[in-house]
């Protein structure tokens, strides 16, 4: 479950302020965030994941108030509870497709790469028609294929919440549908909450909630957003 | 740690060019001081062992180092020859209770080179030498007749010699029409390897080297029946015959002609290039050293360990120089390594950011970098050790040849 209450986040120079009075998603629910570029969609995902800190108000995931955790606790919380699909994939070039998917295990302090986890990684890759590339370097993949690897990585440890920042941004409509279905199926199976950012309005119908984001943004100046939001 | 090592391995393999460059730089930095230390230690050990095992060396007055190196390593030539008279002197001392064994050395010639194979030094000595140096036969038998020789293990391997083969001595001067004929020596034995300069020498009786020297020779029988054109003078009263240069000496000693070999001159004047003296008691040693300590003495008697220590002081200076160079190279390498690591971290900032965003701790990221450096250091150490061991096989002999 994700619960946000009286959240205010301001970037250092004060030109950008995100204000969310109330937002709640139950376990197993899915929500899609839509809004113009620079409206703070990625910022919200980063705040929920504990990557960004220094906000006012409360963000609770399950029973954990994310912003009451210290740096180390937030990092561990992120590793154990949050699956993330980044806008720019952020895959590791020197690892193969399979090793990129298994990366969360390799950096996890208490999870090791076991046979079941390998099998799960292969299953995820197979479900996205990527199993034939599992030994291939990610540098030899197309943008769409890289996107799919990033999604498999996010889903590997069956996280409590999945935060996907435009996971279908580089895919054709058919693959975009398949990705969304995979995300929904996997999160539903594990009872995880899915929050996804997209500009593709044709996908909105798959989600339980649609969150139009422009209502949360306050700008004090007519300046560009400092973040690289799409 | 296992995961960090795995990721480090993958990263190093991916950045092959960078990894190999760093690996080689580190390996060379580690290899240099290790090799210098190992080679010089081996050199010191080898040179000291042989010197310590050689009680006294006797030879013509002049350079002490040249004489010691000549008698111990068959390198360099002594400033002048000594003679068999010194052997007699030692024997006389032995008779008067100063028991000592004297081993003659006549080392002036080499065997002829073959295409691509350098000739070996011919050591003319007595059978006592083999016992003294504990040299054993690997094949064949010891020398017993004039014109026979045994080959050191390296020489035998290099020239593919077996008992029954023959070796030709190399004339010192090819344009000397009056003598210096090459002598064909029969190889009757091959010595076991002793990991010493003896492995690179051919041993024969000192009399055989005198034959090579022209002091002894064999030729057809000359008497009143000989073709008069070969005789310059025939004194029938005294029986002495003077022949012309047309009488050629035998260039091979065979069972058929061995009896015709003879030496001209007084045996006590026959040349030696050095004598190894093995006193049996301290008293004998003191007496022999005393005998040759006089400034009037015609020869000098050396304690090889002392002479070699003088030489090693030079090696010590070389070692110090090598250490300074190694430290300078290490500092430069470490600075460059620091630069490479720093640039590499900047290039990999995105990767680290990804790790962090996924939840990786700073300690894990540091461990990842540490693992890479550790792997590189381990690889470089293994490479450096292997290279050092390989260098050790050749460097000590190279160093010896440079120094001598």
Image: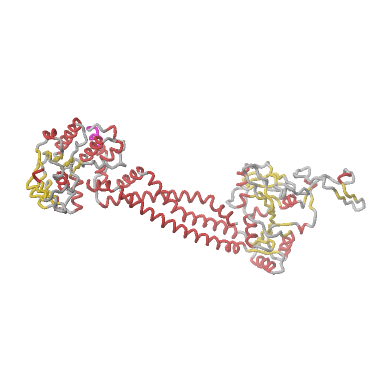
Q: Quadrant of the C terminus of chain A?
A: top left
Where does the image place residue B312, in percent across and percent down from the top left? 56, 61
Q: Quadrant of the N terminus of chain A?
A: top left
Where does the image place residue A47, in percent across and percent down from the top left? 15, 48
Where does the image place residue A53, in percent across and percent down from the top left? 16, 52
Question: Which residue occupies the foreground of this view, B54 or A26?
Answer: A26
Q: Is residue A117 magenta?
A: no
Question: Which residue occupies the foreground of this view, B360 or B51?
Answer: B360
Check the image and name the residue furthest to the front.
A222
Res. A98 image quadrant: top left
The reply, left or right, for residue B162 in relation to residue B256 is left
Res. B162 image quadrant: top right
Q: Is residue A122 magenta?
A: yes
Check the image and name the residue furthest to the top.
A174
Which range is magenta? A121-127
Check the image and name the residue furthest to the right.
B237
Question: Which residue occupies the foreground of this view, B98 or B184?
Answer: B184
Is there any visible trace of residue B369 in the rendered image? yes
């Amino acid at each position: 479950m994700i619960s946000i209450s009286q959240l205010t986040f301001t970037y250092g120079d004060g030109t950008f302020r995100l204000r969310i009075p109330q937002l709640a998603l139950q376990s197993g629910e899915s929500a899609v965030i839509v809004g113009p570029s620079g409206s703070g969609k990625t910022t919200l995902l980063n705040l929920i994941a504990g990557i960004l800190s220094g906000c006012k108000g409360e963000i609770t995931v399950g029973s954990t108030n994310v912003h009451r955790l210290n740096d180390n606790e937030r990092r561990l919380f992120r590793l154990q509870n949050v699956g993330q699909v980044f806008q720019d994939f952020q895959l590791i070039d020197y690892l193969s497709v399979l090793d990129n998917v298994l990366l969360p295990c390799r950096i996890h302090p208490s999870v090791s790469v076991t046979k079941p986890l390998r099998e799960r990684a292969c299953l995820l890759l197979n479900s996205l028609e990527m199993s034939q590339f599992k030994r291939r370097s990610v540098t030899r993949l197309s943008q769409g294929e890289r996107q799919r690897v990033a999604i498999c990585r996010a889903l590997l440890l069956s996280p409590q919440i999945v935060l996907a920042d435009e996971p279908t941004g580089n895919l054709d409509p058919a693959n975009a549908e398949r990705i969304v279905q995979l995300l929904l199926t996997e999160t539903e199976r594990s009872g995880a909450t899915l929050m996804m950012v997209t500009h593709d309005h044709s996908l909105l119908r798959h989600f339980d909630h649609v969150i139009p984001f422009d209502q949360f943004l306050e700008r004090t100046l007519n300046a560009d957003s400092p973040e690289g939001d799409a | 740690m296992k995961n960090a090592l795995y990721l480090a391995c993958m990263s190093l393999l991916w950045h092959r060019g960078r990894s190999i460059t760093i690996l080689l730089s580190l390996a060379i930095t580690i290899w240099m001081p290790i090799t210098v230390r190992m080679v010089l230690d081996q050199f010191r050990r080898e040179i000291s062992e042989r010197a310590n095992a050689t009680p006294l060396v006797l030879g013509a007055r002049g350079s002490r180092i040249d004489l010691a190196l000549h008698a111990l390593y068959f390198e360099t030539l002594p400033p002048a020859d000594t003679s068999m008279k010194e052997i007699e002197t030692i024997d006389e001392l032995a008779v008067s209770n100063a028991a000592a064994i004297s081993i003659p050395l006549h080392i002036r010639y080499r065997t002829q080179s073959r295409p691509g194979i350098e000739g070996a030094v011919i050591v003319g000595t007595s059978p006592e030498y083999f016992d003294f140096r504990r040299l054993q036969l690997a094949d064949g038998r010891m020398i017993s007749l004039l014109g026979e020789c045994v080959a050191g293990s390296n020489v035998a391997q290099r020239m593919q010699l077996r008992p029954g083969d023959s070796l030709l001595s190399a004339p010192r001067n090819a344009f000397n029409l009056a003598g210096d004929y090459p002598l064909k020596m029969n190889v009757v034995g091959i010595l076991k390897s002793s990991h010493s300069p003896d492995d690179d020498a051919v041993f024969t009786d000192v009399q055989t080297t005198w034959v090579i020297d022209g002091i002894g020779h064999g030729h057809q029988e000359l008497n009143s029946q000989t073709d008069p054109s070969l005789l310059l003078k025939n004194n029938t009263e005294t029986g002495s015959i003077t022949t012309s240069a047309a009488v050629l000496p035998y260039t091979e000693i065979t069972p058929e002609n061995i009896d015709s070999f003879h030496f001209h001159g007084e045996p006590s004047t026959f040349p030696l290039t050095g004598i190894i003296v093995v006193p049996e008691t301290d008293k004998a040693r003191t007496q022999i050293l005393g005998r040759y300590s006089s400034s009037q003495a015609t020869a000098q008697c050396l304690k090889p360990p002392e002479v070699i220590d003088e030489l090693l002081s030079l090696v010590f200076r070389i070692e110090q120089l090598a250490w300074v160079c190694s430290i300078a190279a290490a500092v430069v390498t470490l600075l460059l390594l620091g630069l490479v690591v720093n640039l590499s971290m900047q290039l990999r900032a995105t990767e680290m950011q990804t790790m962090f965003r996924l939840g990786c701790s700073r300690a894990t990221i540091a461990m990842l970098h540490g693992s890479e450096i550790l792997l590189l250091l381990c690889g470089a150490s293994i490479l450096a050790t292997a290279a050092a061991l390989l260098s050790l096989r050749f460097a000590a002999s190279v160093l010896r040849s440079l120094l001598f």
